[in-house]
Image: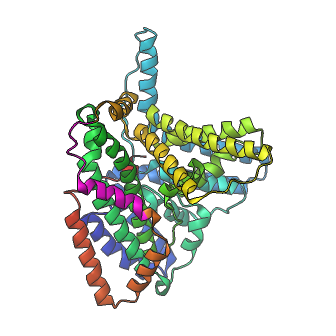
């Protein structure tokens, strides 16, 4: 079920009041919310509801077994089994075709006729997200950072529909305490919730979908047919598209959760204003960045070893982070580029500290230059993220240099404005949207409702026909 659809609107109109009516009685509310979330998830393919149920039961059993066990070796063995089980399910659905096709390519290059039969496996929507949340629950229990809860409560945590298919990745300590006690409807910031939802709809329906249909899909689909200017604008367009798409989804998810009385962590903080690659990852998909840091980078050794070990840990983390995004070598290359950027940042910091040099003073010009350099590096990496293969990525990059002067009909005023809006909004001071939401909250209910209806109509009129699935659904 997609957020910006009439189907979801009807779903929310039913679930929202029912949730508030049942919330004082947790023994009824929790099964209701699990059932509603399963309907939301199963709307795409009901068969995969059983996968979610299996993940819930398996991880609940593992967490309680770890918590009750007192022998360190046994606790570690249960944890290893739980982690391997989660990753095995994820690997089967997400990477079976990738590994088999890679093996086929290797066998073909060796001149052997032993190519395995390619198995087609349908990827369940959101499997990476709820698997990572399940791993957080089990690992935090092992670390004694969290005490396992009842099965109904854990089932709500794992399946809660606002975050189920594309995050944000919410830790047990961030959501479970909110689920344990009924929310107070008098404390719901409805103005902020509606503001987030409308902003998300605008970014997804108007900005992301428009750029995809007007230039990005055409250029990346057949780069040789387009001019260098169109190719350059399409690369910038995709950078804005993926931000608007995922930022839009996250805003809708956070807004819907807020209407239900729950607060999710922030997932984006103006990532294209970053001064370095390290700064970018502190601002982009922040819940994933923190997950990779706490459950992968630090267990690998983090920055507590030698410099070489630190660089290795950074690179491994980003390579695996790239593979998490998709089952293709282009995603691994994207992760490798991000890893190289992080390693370079750390190397320059280490060299400065080794020489006893102070932090360099950043002027306005220097800040602008660093932002421009970082943004263009991120855009270069996005080419590999978006391309279907290395050959396609090569063709896009090649087209940047060989077709200047050709007609560029796809570079329209609308495309340029959409890119400018997608980037420029990240430079708007945070106090301005907060001020707008504060004033919106003081409107009368009738005026607020009319304003929401008008904005929805405008968004619908400005967006292209139909609603494309969110990009991160396939991760």
Residue visible at 45% across and 62% down in the picture: 426
Residue 369 or residue 22, whichever sits in front: 369
Percent from the top left, x then y, of residue 12? 33, 71
Q: Is residue 65 left or right of residue 370?
A: right
Is residue 112 positioned above or below 216 on the image? above
Does 131 appear in magenta?
no
Tell me, yes or no, if residue 355 can be seen here: yes
The residue located at (29%, 88%) in the rendering is: 447
Image quadrant containing the N terminus: bottom left
Q: Nearer the viewer, residue 426 or 308?
A: 426
Q: Residue at the location (68% across, 41% down)?
A: 347
Judge whether residue 418 is colored magenta.
yes
In the depicted structure, whether residue 17 falls above or below residue 164: below
Residue 208 is situated, as x and y percent measured from the top left of the image, at: 32, 55
Judge left or right: residue 30 versus residue 205: right
Task: Give the vertical position of 193 relative to 98 (above or below).
Answer: below
Q: Give the range drawn in magenta.
A: 405-425
Q: Which colour scheme is used?
A: rainbow
Q: Residue furthest bottom?
A: 444
Dominant SS in magenta = helix
């Amino acid at each position: 079920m997609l957020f910006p659809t009439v189907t979801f609107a009807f779903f929310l109109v039913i679930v929202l009041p029912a949730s508030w009516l049942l919330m004082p009685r947790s023994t009824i509310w929790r099964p209701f919310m699990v059932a509603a979330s399963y309907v939301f998830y199963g709307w795409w393919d009901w068969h995969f509801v059983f996968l979610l149920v299996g993940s819930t039961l398996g991880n609940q059993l593992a967490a309680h077994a770890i918590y009750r066990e007192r022998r360190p070796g046994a606790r570690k063995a249960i944890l290893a089994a739980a982690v391997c089980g989660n990753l095995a399910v994820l690997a089967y659905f997400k990477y079976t075709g990738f590994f088999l096709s890679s093996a086929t390519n290797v066998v073909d290059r060796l001149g052997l006729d032993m190519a395995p039969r390619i198995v087609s496996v349908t990827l369940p929507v959101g499997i990476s997200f709820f698997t990572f949340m399940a791993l957080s629950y089990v690992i935090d229990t092992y670390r004694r950072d969290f005490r396992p809860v009842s099965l109904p409560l854990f089932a709500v945590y794992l399946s809660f529909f606002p975050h189920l298919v594309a995050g944000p990745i919410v830790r047990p300590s961030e959501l479970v305490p909110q689920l344990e006690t009924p929310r107070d409807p008098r404390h719901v910031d409805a103005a902020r919730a509606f503001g987030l939802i409308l902003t998300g709809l605008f970014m997804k329906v108007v900005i992301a979908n428009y750029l995809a249909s007007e230039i990005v899909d055409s250029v990346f689909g057949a780069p040789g047919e387009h001019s260098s200017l169109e190719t350059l604008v399409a690369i910038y367009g995709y950078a804005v598209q993926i931000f608007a798409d995922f930022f839009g989804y996250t805003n809708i998810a956070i807004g819907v959760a807020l209407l239900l009385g729950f607060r999710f962590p922030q997932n984006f903080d103006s990532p294209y204003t970053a001064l370095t690659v390290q700064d970018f990852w502190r601002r982009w998909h922040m819940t994933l960045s923190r997950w990779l840091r706490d459950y992968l980078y630090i267990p690998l050794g983090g920055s507590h070893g030698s410099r070489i070990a630190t660089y290795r840990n950074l690179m491994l983390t980003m390579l695996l982070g790239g593979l998490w995004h998709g089952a293709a070598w282009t995603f691994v290359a994207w992760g490798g580029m991000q890893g190289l950027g992080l390693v370079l940042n750390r190397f320059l910091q280490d060299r400065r500290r080794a020489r006893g040099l102070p932090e360099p003073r950043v002027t306005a010009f220097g800040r602008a230059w660093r932002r421009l350099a970082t943004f263009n590096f991120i855009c270069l990496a996005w080419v590999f993220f978006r391309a279907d293969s290395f050959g396609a990525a090569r063709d896009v990059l090649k087209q940047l240099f060989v077709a200047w002067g050709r007609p560029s009909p796809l570079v329209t005023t609308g495309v340029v404005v959409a890119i400018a809006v997608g980037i420029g909004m990240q430079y708007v001071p945070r106090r301005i949207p907060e001020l707008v939401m504060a004033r919106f909250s003081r409107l009368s209910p009738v005026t607020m409702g009319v304003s929401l209806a008008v904005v929805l109509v405008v968004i619908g009129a400005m967006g292209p026909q139909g609603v494309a699935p969110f990009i991160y659904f396939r991760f």
